[in-house]
Image: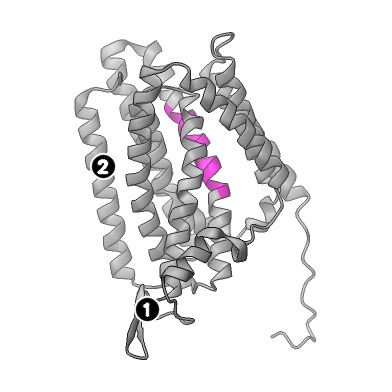
Amino acid sequence: MDTIAPTWLWVFFIAAVLVALFVDFVVLRKQGAHTVGVKEALNWSIVWVALSFAFNGLFWWAVQQDHGTAVANTKAMEFLTGYLIEKSLAVDNIFVFLMIFTYFAVPAEFQKRVLMIGIIGAIVLRTIMILVGSWLVSEFDWVLYVVGAFLLLTGIKMWWAAGQEPDLDSNPALKLLRKVLPVSKNFDGEKFFTIENGKKIATPLLMVIALVGLTDVIFAVDSIPAIFAITSDPFIVLTSNIFAILGLRAMYFLLAAVAAKFHLLSYGLAVILVFIGTKMLLIDVYKIPVLVSLGVVVAILAITMIWSVKTAPKTDPVPADSDAR
């Protein structure tokens, strides 16, 4: 697995992720269980995005020192494109999280811990998948065509499924979990197990953790191959993916407040997957420049979000003399 990143930058990246997670856990523990407001979510989102851009700047400098400005510009653009693609696909992931929390009626003050644990699992899972994927791509060129076809079909499937609410009642994983584990009807704080009638049983929060983890596995299968369409460098694929994941929790609470306004976003994500899949299938015929790929992704997201806001369903204001006060 060839990479342009020097060894010291790998070490710095690993250390930076560990420090970021440690700080996040310390803040989480000090704050305790509480509802995350839009202002707090926005502030943390800005912090994570700023850290990602700062790391990309350091990456550009490291590559520029060894390979020159032109190569550094290309590699930094690959990181930015991969980061943006992962962030975009994570939005669809977030909407599913919102649906899971709503289905289980998870109190807002408990959602923060669930997402934090989910992020840890996602980092471990995606690191393994990316390293294995990088090895496969380096050893077998035809894998890119398989991945391209997969993304193309996934994009088409996402387009047809857009706007439809997933049915958790018929979810096979949830049915299996309920058969294997007796589950309490009530939450017990942030605990995953509780005691009822002298027996230790799972709380609904454990079911939520399991479904959040399963959801991330499913979305990782889509998002990771999408970044391989931009670059085959394992360092860029891994770092852009992980930095996007680190800000997932803050982005969830930010988007949860305005989810209804972006009701057309799934269609835009579907088009992005179709574009990326087509890009991979045409790689030996015509290699689409990274800057063009970045422009297409940004344009699709911008058009979809603007159109979503313009066509968002309007909610009727509550009459002043109604009983809802």
Location of mark 2 (residue): 16
Looking at the rendered image, the disc whose residue lies closer to the viewer, 2 or 1, is: 1
Quadrant position of residue 269: top right
Q: Magenta span covers which residues?
A: 79-92
Provide the secondary structure element on which disc 2 rests. Answer: helix
At label 2, counting other C-alpha atoms closer than 10 Å, the crowd grade (few under 14, some 14-19, many 20 or more) is some
- Residue 7, given in percent of the width and then of the height, sits at 20, 25
Provide the secondary structure element on which disc 1 rests. Answer: strand
Is there any visible trace of residue 220 in the rendered image? yes
Q: CA distance from mark 2 to mark 1?
A: 38 Å
Nearer-the-camera pick, 27 or 117: 117
Q: Residue at x 58, y 31 (%)?
A: 151
Q: Is residue 39 left or right of residue 276?
A: left
At label 1, counting other C-alpha atoms closer than 10 Å, the crowd grade (few under 14, some 14-19, many 20 or more) is some
Q: Amino acid at mark 2?
A: Ala
Q: Is 91 within the magenta?
A: yes
Check residue 201 in the rendering and tell me which mark sits there, or answer none. 1
Nearer-the-camera pick, 120 or 112: 120
Q: Main secondary structure of the magenta part?
A: helix
- Residue 214, given in percent of the width and then of the height, sits at 46, 53
